[in-house]
Image (cartoon, grey):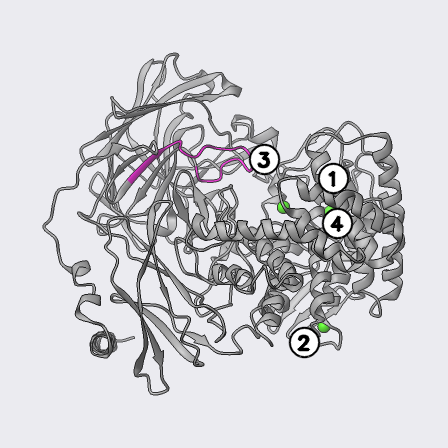
Amino acid sequence: MTSLDTGRYTTAAAVRTALALAIACWLGGTAAAQPKEQKLQKPQAQPTGLRLNDREFFETRGLNVLVFTNQYNGMFFDEKTAGVEIIQHDVRLATGGAVRLSPTPEQWDLIPKMIDRKVDKAANTITCLLRYEAFDFDSRLVVTPEGSGFRVAVFVDKPVPEKLEGRAGLNIEFLPSKFFERTYLADGQAGIFPRHPTGPTVVKPGDTKIRQFEGYTTFENRGRNEYVEPTPVAVGKKLILAPEDPERRVTIQALSGELQLLDGRNLAQNGWFVVRSLLATKATGKVAEWVVRPNIIPNWTRTPVIGFSQAGYHPTQKKVVVIELDPHDTALPAAFLFEVTGDGAPIERMQAKVQPWGSYLRYKYVTADFSTVNRPGLYYIQYGRQKTETFPIGPQVYDTIWHATADVWFPVQMDHMAVNEAYRVWHGLPHMDDALQAPLNIQHFDNYRMGPTTETKYKPLERIPGLAVGGWFDAGDFDFEAPAHAGTILSLADTWEAFKPQRDQTLIDQASHFVDIHRPDGKPDLQQQIEHGTLQVAAHYRAFGRLARGMTDSLLYRYHHLGDASTQTDNLLFDPSLEPYQVEGTRSGTPDDRWVFTMRMPSNNYSGIGALAAASRALRGYNDTLADECLALAKKAYGEERQVAATAVPTGREAAFGQGAELTAVLQLLITTKEQQYIDRFNELVWPALDRPGGRALLAAVKAVPYLGPGATEKLRPYVVKYQAEIDGLAKANPYGVPISTGGWAGSGGVIGWATTNYYLHKVYPDLIDKESVYRGLYFLFGTHPASNVSLVATVGTRSKRLAYGNNRADFSFIPGVVVPGVLILKPDYPEHMDDWPFLWGENEGTIGGASAYLFLANAAQELVGK
Ligand SMILES: [Ca+2]
Ligand SMILES: [Ca+2]
Ligand SMILES: [Ca+2]
């Protein structure tokens, strides 16, 4: 592009913006509705310093400093949500401020245990006692406001252990995506933050590496006794990050020693930029100290987030926009709906009075209701000078919302198949060396476990036949997660039975292990997917008589594989008589065949039984042989599991989970067989379960109502009345009126499950549960949610996820149709959704469970709007 073109473009854009504003004012924006006060430059007041607030973090307008408000929870180790964290202009810019043992800690590197946290309001200080058990090493991290920033210091009562000299340091990590296309100064020396890491690194002797979690290693040394460590990109006493950008500028000064700037992406794609000082050795007292000054824009006010459905609205639906405001912001009196016409001139169709909703988390919320507009067309919302993306209102808006998930996402997740799309190969044929019996007494890095026996007829590391077939990659990783699988098969079977979608846009050939996307083969894709998942589950029942817990990598450096699934293992059968990396015919000496974790868990087995029983119906008429076998396997396994339960009563977690899962199994068996024994058992389980807190039994109960005989509908009604009151309560709990989870994994899956329950209840009790309670789940997914208004379903809606934690995340890309978890609520009050950094799984990792549940909900909504 020439400079002349650039100039013309800029001018044209400016003219368009000015015109749009003029039209907006002229068409309906009353003077009072225009956000003049937002743009007026207020006098440049000096920002006041940080102070400790009641929520136990340091706060001033435009800046928060959190000190172990969120902890390393150990579940997946370093989740990049712990330690000293900086939220600058409402962006969580830095995390992991703590004493760490490596230059750029990876996910499975040792994390400090926080032993004690003292919040001293009088001294305006937070002190954390951190411990590394393996080295008997304690340190104190002290954070105190200073000037417009803060001071962070590390104290030790005993010198740094010898083994950690030159290793233990004060680290803090900066989010790379916020520094792309920006620069830094290190003692005045200029540098550019690289878009992709280009070193430097050094190789060190393997036996000097600090042990990672449980002795696993993230590094494949290819038989060489060595490991890689990043060395600094820059060094100095004073670092200024992004000096050119007032929103991002951070100055860090070392009061003793020097600062290193390192690039964690050299070791792991999810690494961050790290600033680090080594702790002083052979000394006690203060061993590191910095002053950190994140720039603060005076009187900074966050841009409002206009929550709406990026996929648009059916004319009959409510159209309530939720606007998320900075607590310092003043709500405008009105928001506007403009129709976009064919000649590009927008026409104001409605001015909606802005209604206060109240406070939720750290923001305040207002709503604007455009429900009375039902004329089909294209629209956008204007609030102040902000305009949303253009979206449709029309009877067809839900016609295609599940197609990307069914046509692309599920095919790409298919294991034991090569998957092609037009000119592109998504992945070759993976994991044909599945699988070996897992050995004993293991705590695996992806939360699998093995006890003291295999509880199968196989010996540790013995090959289990028939497992290189079917199944899906669980999520952004490649393992076979059995309960998620069972749930996915159930959900797909539900969708098939309820809506019978005949859509055929995929060729799936089990005989040649080949999938071609956008190529019909005369068979409904949904039945083909149900068959594909069932092939793997049925193989477990043939091998073990029950469902194993999962199948995954034995080696951490294979597990974190990114890219083509077919290269995760060598697809050759492991032969211990060969040397590592030696290949003879179809055998190899590389121990990369995956392991099957077979610890007995009744809940897991009941989930598999339910899946097989449901699949036996969904596959009827499509693959009768498999359908017959599924039912036989399910009935046999159910009888056996009941026998086990009669002799060994499960306890603890397994008791609670087991009952819920048995309910699912019995429900599916009774629907398939209509046998009285299952109806009786279901009645025995469901009514007490309904009286317990939790609520999952309600969904099973309402699904079973048609099979339970006369009176069941009325018997269930009081529970639905109670549930309806809970739905009403949600409208007061948050402005979105859906259950928003606050756990370590964001909650779109929970919202989908809730809306799906509402659908089933609406079908039986339309007087109690309305359609809007179903739609609300979709409004949330499609952009009416906190923190941003991006659609959480990639390729659904005008603006949707462009980055996700799929297995192609290293390319800053996504797999179309992925349903991401969405908005993570970090303690105590910060909703976060990263849309320029794909590597936080709690926000961006789609799962087969979430995607299959979405397929159901999307079909349900289509039915309700009257497709
Ligand atoms: Ca997994
Ligand atoms: Ca097909
Ligand atoms: Ca192999």
Magenta stretch contains residue 68: yes
Secondary element under disc 3, as helix, strand or loop, is loop
Amino acid residing under circle 1: Gly
Q: Which residue is mark 3?
A: 217
Residue 49 visible in the snapshot: yes
* Separation of residues labelled 3 and 2 (CA atoms): 42 Å
Q: CA distance from mark 1 to mark 3?
A: 34 Å
Q: Is residue 228 above or below residue 616?
A: above
> Which residue carries the number 4 mark?
664
Q: Is mark 3 within 8 Å of ligand 3?
A: no
The verdict on label 1 being within 8 Å of ligand 1 is: no
The residue that label 2 is drawn on is: 519
- Which region is colored magenta? 64-81
Amino acid on which disc 3 is placed:
Thr
Where's the N terminus, which quadrant? Answer: bottom left
Mark 4 lies on a secondary structure that is: helix
Kindly indicate the quadrant of the structure image that contains residue 33: bottom left
Type of amino acid under label 4: Thr
Disc 1 target residue: 658
Nearest to the eye among marks 2 and 1: give it. 1
Does residue 242 show up magenta in the picture?
no
Q: Is residue 703 left or right of residue 806?
A: right
Q: Residues within 10 Å of mark 3 (few under 14, many from 20)?
A: some
Give the foreground label among 2 and 4.
4
